[in-house]
Image (tube, rainbow, N blue to C red):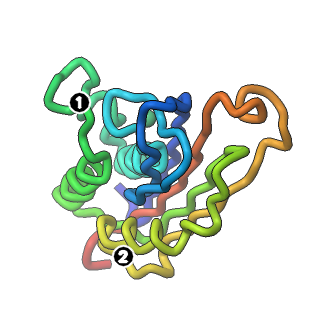
Amino acid sequence: MGSMRIGFGYDSHRFDEARPLVLGGVLIPDHPGLLGHSDGDAIAHAVTDALLGAAALGDIGRHFPPSEPQWKDVDSMELLARVVELIGESGLRVCNVDVTVITEEPKIAPNVQAMVARLSEVLRTAPDAISVKGKTNEGMGWIGSGEGMAVHAVALLERSGD
Ligand code: MG
């Protein structure tokens, strides 16, 4: 395995009026949450898959199957923390992570600072190693109609000690 590893993660969830919105470990008030077996934190899920992809360790569904009741309503940042442990056991650590959230609402920018603080804590990086940004889909398609949101994430890992 080389000393640098890149991984990509994607996630999408449907909005659900009955749930609180949690993104990047941050509770965002006054907006419908995301439907899912866990807390529906699509940023946490996309970043988790980016890390697992970079380490070639499978995906979130393999490590935390939705068929298992222990993962119901779980804090997805806890799953991300477990994956940081896992890649650490493979001798890897996070260099930097870049996230793009695609949604018409809510606005992502006002929540970026809190998300970066939370993500950098769990990923064991400096805050300036984490980037979170939001885009709309210009009103097009299922995102544009407000049916749900999508998240893309890339992660660069390096061998510990390099
Ligand atoms: Mg998900």
At mark 2, the secondary structure is loop
The answer to whether residue 131 is above or below residue 101 is below
Q: Which residue is mark 1?
A: 72
Which is nearer the eye, 51 or 126? 126
Q: Nearer the viewer, mark 1 or mark 2?
A: 1
Precedes in sequence: disc 1 or disc 2 = 1
Q: Quadrant of residue 41?
A: top left
The answer to whether residue 53 is above or below residue 127 is above
Which is nearer the eye, 2 or 127? 127
Q: Which amino acid, by three-letter code, is at mark 2?
A: Thr
Q: Which residue is mark 2?
A: 125
Measured as percent of width and height from the top left, residue 66 is found at 28, 24
**Crowd rating for badge 1 (residues with CA inside 10 Å; few <14, some 14–19, many 20+):** some
Q: In the visual, does 45 lie left or right of 105? A: left
Label 2 near label 1: C-beta < 8 Å?
A: no
- Quadrant placement of the C terminus: bottom left
- Residue at (73%, 53%) from the top-left corner? 135
Query: Does any atom of ligand 1 lie closer than 8 Å to the CB of label 2?
Result: no
Q: Which amino acid, by three-letter code, is at mark 1?
A: Lys
Measured as percent of width and height from the top left, residue 10 is found at 54, 40
- Quadrant placement of the N terminus: bottom left
Q: Quadrant of residue 109?
A: bottom right
At mark 1, the secondary structure is loop
- Residue at (31%, 34%) from the top-left corner? 38
- Distance from Cα at disc 1 to Cα at disc 2: 28 Å
The answer to whether residue 134 is above or below residue 147 is below
Ligand 1 placement by image quarter:
top left
Measured as percent of width and height from the top left, residue 150 is found at 61, 39
- Residue at (54%, 55%) from the top-left corner? 154
**Crowd rating for badge 2 (residues with CA inside 10 Å; few <14, some 14–19, many 20+):** some
